[in-house]
Image (cartoon, grey):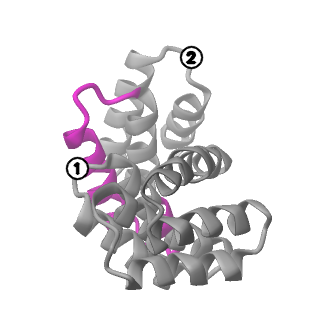
């Protein structure tokens, strides 16, 4: 989960503020302020600023979906996971071609003990990517295991290990599945 947060921090702290400086619109300025507040640990302020930026109706495309996604990440960190699902879904609605948003929603579904929905999202990631990774198959393996779909979980763990021999997460999952 930390790697996801760090990747988001890069996008929010580097890419979006650079865009805000270019166009100078109120929404873009709010995105920049939200990113700074989020980085400083003021989740409540960041959440509100992302909401205000969205409410301006000036955001489009990746900026809009990114703002929804950031709100979802913040809500997840505040243990408001059902609300986070709604924000991730909005991000997906705006940018359905972005696998990253499906991953955030899938991981949140897993924390809510909804593995079938997580499987759907991890499957969508695999469908969207030209070359799915070992990580993608291992993630779906874990969701299948949580959904008690052992044979599908084993298949995905094996695919993960085929793509990245020795991948520890896939190995651990496969060992657990072999025992159970």
Residue 142 location (% of width, % of height): 47, 48
Asked if the stretch drawn in magenta spans residue 112, the answer is yes
Q: In front: mark 1 or mark 2? A: 1
Residue 36 on image: x %, y %: 70, 62
Residue pointed to by mark 2: 166
Main SS of residues in magenta: helix
Give the CA separation, mark 1 to mark 2. Answer: 30 Å
Q: Residue at point 72% right, 69% down?
A: 37
Return the disc, 1 or 2, that comes first in the chain's sequence.
1
Image: magenta residue range? 107-133
Left or right of 107 in this view: 54: left
Q: Quadrant of residue 153?
A: top left
For residue 12, the mark is none
Identify the residue position indicated by label 1 in the image. Answer: 97
Q: Residue at x 40, y 49 (%)?
A: 100
User: Residue 141: percent from the left, percent from the top?
Assistant: 41, 44
Q: Secondary structure at mark 2?
A: loop
* Residue 126 part of the magenta segment: yes
Q: What kind of element bears circle 1?
A: loop
């Amino acid at each position: 989960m930390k790697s996801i947060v760090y990747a988001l921090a890069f996008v929010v702290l580097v890419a979006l503020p650079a865009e805000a400086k270019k166009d100078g619109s109120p929404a873009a300025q709010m995105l920049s302020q939200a990113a700074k507040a989020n980085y400083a640990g003021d989740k409540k302020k960041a959440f509100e600023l992302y909401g205000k930026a969205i409410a301006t109706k000036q955001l489009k495309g990746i900026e809009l979906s990114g703002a929804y996604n950031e709100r979802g990440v913040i809500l997840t960190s505040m243990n408001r996971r059902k609300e986070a699902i709604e924000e991730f879904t909005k991000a997906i609605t705006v940018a359905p071609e972005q696998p990253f948003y499906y991953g955030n929603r899938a991981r949140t579904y897993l924390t809510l003990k909804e593995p079938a929905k997580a499987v759907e999202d991890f499957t969508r990631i695999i469908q969207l990517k030209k070359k799915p990774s070992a990580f993608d198959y291992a993630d779906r393996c874990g969701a299948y295991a949580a959904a008690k779909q052992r044979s599908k979980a084993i298949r995905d763990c094996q695919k993960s290990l085929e793509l990245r021999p020795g991948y520890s997460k896939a190995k651990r999952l496969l060992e657990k599945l072999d025992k159970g």
